[in-house]
Image: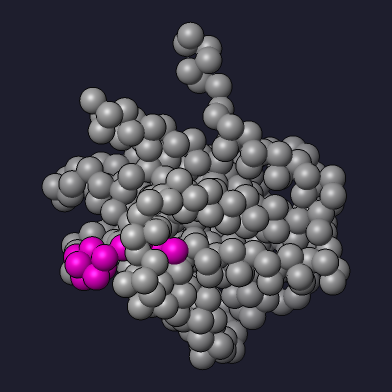
Amino acid sequence: MKIIRWLPDTFVLLILAAVLLASLLPVAGQAAQWFGYFTQAAIALLFFMHGAKLSAQQVRAGLGQWRLHLAVFACTFALFPLLGWLLRPVFSAVVGQELTLGLLFLCALPSTVQSSIAFTAMAGGNVAAAVCSAATSSLLGVFVTPLLVVLMFGVHGDFALGPAVLQVALQLLLPFALGQWARRWIGAWVQRHRSWLKQVDNSSILLVVYGSFSAAVVGGIWQRVDAWHLALLLVLCVMLLALVFAITLGLGQLCGFAWEDRKTLFFCGSKKSLTTGIPLANVLFPAVSVGLMILPTMLFHQIQLLACAYVARRWGHAGSQSQAH
């Protein structure tokens, strides 16, 4: 029984299968473009359904939890960069200067949006607060990440803020607002079919995993560094994520947050966005160095999805059992 307990569940195995499929059969070219559109549509549907599920009172309560939002932003834009700066000598000694800069760039990125919310929902956390924190983090990242990059290693670039802000608003906030508007007609149906919404959560994460890792494979992720340095980089990413996991759990308890809010802080404050990182890297760094610069983010992104999927499923299962009793 103990061996079975520690085996990964079905969803974690599906994520591993998506990574393997992307490595063997990555989507590329015109197909990748259409797959990206499909993924964006799935994410928009996810936000629409969450907007229809949450009552206006829940949304207002989520917006009003300023202490929780400040804790998430502090973890994303202060804790991560501080850890990166303090660990810089270790990073440099283990994987060299180029990959160290990539790790620092990773630490400066905003949190993910769709997976943060999906994992929070899966774990039984405060979804309304997660929507507000994750979406705001993504918007802040458009402004804050370039500043952090400049502060940490003096890179400059001309970044188009307007299109990035517009993309976040159209893809995430607008569907959520439309879901809130449509709640009067479909809210009861969504409540009755919450298991279907859970499948939308899971499916959107799998699509993001396959799409992002396909892009990494097509970009030559396996040719950019040798196997030894890739393994060392993987270990550093795991250590960094484990450290942030521990700090976010401790911070949530120290701040006296409810268990649902501590789950939100854990999932929103511990992750970094690959979808934001790639375009930012293309603007901030020379073309010849973009590949190595985003490699740590590519690895960290996959590790965080696997780890958070495992934790979210365990917490969600524990919550379901406690409600049953």
Corner quadrant of residue 325? top left
User: Residue 245: x, y in percent?
Assistant: 38, 43
In this view, 93 is above or below 207:
above
User: Residue 183: x, y in percent?
Assistant: 35, 70
Of residues 288 and 135, the one nearer the viewer is 135
Residue shown at 33% from the left, 33% from the top = 320
Main SS type for the magenta part? helix
Q: Is residue 233 left or right of residue 131?
A: right
Queried whether the magenta region covers residue 187, the answer comes back as no
Of residues 66 and 292, the one nearer the viewer is 66
Q: Which region shows up in magenta?
A: 49-63
Of residues 110 and 10, the one nearer the viewer is 10
- Res 78 seen here: no
User: Residue 77: x, y in percent?
Assistant: 38, 65
In this view, 298 is above or below 315:
below
- Res 190 seen here: yes
Residue shown at 38% from the left, 74% from the top = 182
Residue shown at 45% from the left, 69% from the top = 48
Corner quadrant of residue 237? top right
Queried whether the magenta region covers residue 61, the answer comes back as yes
Q: Is residue 292 left or right of residue 116?
A: right
In this view, 68 is above or below 124:
below
User: Residue 197: x, y in percent?
Assistant: 47, 53
